[in-house]
Image: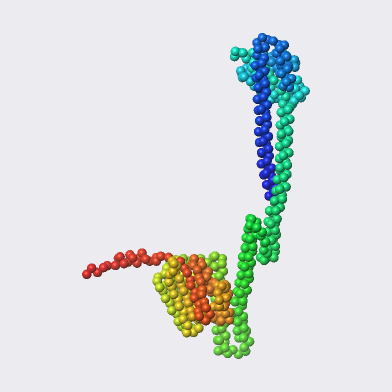
Amino acid sequence: MVLVYMALIGIAFGLVVWAVMNVTGTYLVDQRVREQLEIVDELALEVTPYVRTADADTLYNLLAQRGRETDARLLLLNADGTVWVDSLSELNGVRLGHGEVTDVTSLHMDRSYGFHRVKKGTVTSLSGEWIAYYTCGVTSRNELLGVVMMVSSLSELTRSLNEIQNSIIIFFVMVLLVVLLVGLYFSSVITHPINELNNLMQQTARSGFTVRAKPRGNDEIAQLGRTFNMMSEKLQNMDQMRNDFISNASHELKTPLSAMKILIESLLHQDALDPAMTREFLGDINQEIDRLSAIVGDLLTIVRFDSRSEKLQMEPIALDELLFDTLGRLNPVAKQAQITLEPACDELCFVNGDPIKLQQVIYNLTDNAIKYTPAGGTVWIRLFTQSGRAVLEVRDNGIGIPKESLPHLFERFYRVDKARSRSTGGTGLGLSIVQSVVHLHGGDIEVESEENVGTTFRVYLPLVEDPYADFDEQDEEAQPTDEN
């Protein structure tokens, strides 16, 4: 990351340096051109009267003097581009065809200039590798009398540009080195906690979810560390729940299998089978098989809920009808246990749900109340509405639940009284299934209990409008009235 950032910074700095050098070079060149053209313009005005009188000696002395002052070679050409006066007296009588000359003589431009690269040591190049030609017309009464030409070396300008370029490059390199060092320092500061977190993740992969980060501050890395701790804690809890689930499921499955094995072995070791005892043992085996089947069924239901593969067949349901239908199936169980069922429905309640799953909720809660209520007790089942929700309340006057057990009541395989729960045939999964079904329907469930007083479960489900209301109104309108 540091190298990438340094490369990006280097490219950006390089573009800035290139732009600064171009701007600086353009400015210096433009300034030099303006200065030289002003000198040529002044010289053209100065030589005009001597050109009209053809005073060659005066013109030579003037050009030689101005050449020494400007450190340049000055030439005076006639209208056809032939050298008339040369400050160095070397090109007199030579016709020059330079573009800067023809711009004035043929194209009738007031002035012109250009830059040329020539070999060192030539007469026209003075002492520089680059030279500049500046030309200006000498006119009188709109008549071109001649051309003043300045040949100037650009070595000083080139040297200044090189010095500026070198200074900028040196400054750029120094800044880049400083940025690189600062970047390396801060990258080590930033990547150190990232490396620590990476090591923690590798350690977690090797040793489990007990490893925790120690975030410091409130920056992004610290937030990442806290998120890692939350994830590790959640995964640890899930792993513990998985282990507990496997352990409890194995124990629950092993218990009826062990009982069946003992009963079968007892039958196998009997030389003469007693019909009464055989019937009793086979009845016990049948009960254990039913218990085993119930456990497997509940386990499959839990797995489907966890994997989100349990599909609900949602439809509008009259909850009061579902309640009385379910209680009709439980009446024989209640009578056998000498328990009185007291249903009450304050008003019609319609919910959107799966009738089979909601019936399982009513059945499990009522069946639990019957199982844990002593003979002669009562179970009250009430259905009413509250704040836009249907409320199913199942209350009993049974043995109650200890306060410390209430937070764990919906955990899988949790039993308040393990011995009595197994004797009643419970699997420890019923309330967990009830909670899952209620949550899938967008509802909630709560429990209140007091030992030796009783327990109350309340299920809250969202209400929907009566789907048959429109049909009922139409039926009433269609009924004939007795006008007599």
Residue 403 appears left or right of 72: left
Residue visible at 51% across and 66% down in the picture: 440
Looking at the image, which residue is at 63% across and 74% down? Answer: 247
Q: Is residue 16 above or below residue 246?
A: above
Is residue 128 visible in the rendered image? The answer is yes
Of all residues, the one furthest to the right in this rendering is 121
Q: Which corner quadrant of the image does residue 327 belong to?
A: bottom left
Q: Is residue 311 above or below residue 104?
A: below
Choose top left, top right, bottom left or bottom right for residue 127: top right
Question: Which residue reaches farthest top?
Answer: 53
Query: 157 or 362, which is in the foreground?
Result: 157
Q: Is residue 88 above or below residue 216?
A: above
Check the picture and name the quadrant holding the C terminus: bottom left
The residue drawn where x is 57% and y is 78% is 416
**Rendering coords of residue 275 (x, y %):** 56, 89
The spot of residue 268 in percent (x, y) is 62, 85
Q: Decide if residue 114 is in sight here.
A: no
| Residue 104: percent from left, percent from top | 63, 18
The residue closer to the viewer here, 67 or 242, is: 67
